Amino acid sequence: MILAHLYGEEMMRFSDLQRAIPDVSQKVLIQQLRGLESDGVISRAVYPEVPPKVEYRLTDVGKQLGPVFMALLDWAEILRTREGAKKPVEPVGVK
């Protein structure tokens, strides 16, 4: 979910990601962001303000995952259609 949201935006602040993914706890979101950062998929910029401003964006490696997301969304839509779901999967912020 994090990558899907970041794929559609140049950058997102931590609070934007929290609002975009309301079902995830702050702790889990932080853990996932740290993991993605350590894997080199996203970059994190901290601005020394009060309150601190933290921005996340995809690295070049992360941007290369775009076609993978599109393929997964297509696959998910096929599965939902087969299962008779009422609503197809919609890409979130993916251009």
Image (tube, rainbow, N blue to C red):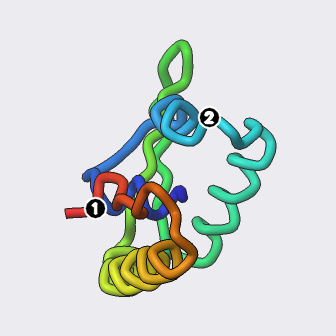
Determine whether 40 is above or below 88 in the image. Answer: below
Residue 62 relative to residue 40: left or right: left
Whether residue 35 can be seen here = yes
Q: Report the disc number at residue 94.
A: 1
Q: Residue at x 45, y 85 (%)?
A: 75
Instruction: Rate crowding at label 1 as few (under 14), some (14 to 19) or many (20 or more) other CA atoms within 10 Å.
Output: some
Between 3 and 86, the one nearer to me in the picture: 86
Q: Which residue is mark 2?
A: 22
Residue 54 relative to residue 68: left or right: right
Q: Residue at x 32, y 75 (%)?
A: 63
Q: Amino acid at mark 1?
A: Val
- Residue 22 in percent (x, y) is at 62, 34
Choose top left, top right, bottom left or bottom right for residue 61.
Answer: bottom left
Whether residue 61 can be seen here = no
Determine whether 34 is above or below 63 in the image. Answer: above
Between 5 and 79, the one nearer to me in the picture: 79
Q: Amino acid at mark 2?
A: Pro
Between 31 and 67, the one nearer to me in the picture: 67
Sequence order check: which comes first, mark 2 or mark 1?
A: 2
Residue occupying the far front of the picture: 84
Q: Report the disc number at residue 42.
A: none
Q: Quadrant of the N terminus?
A: bottom right
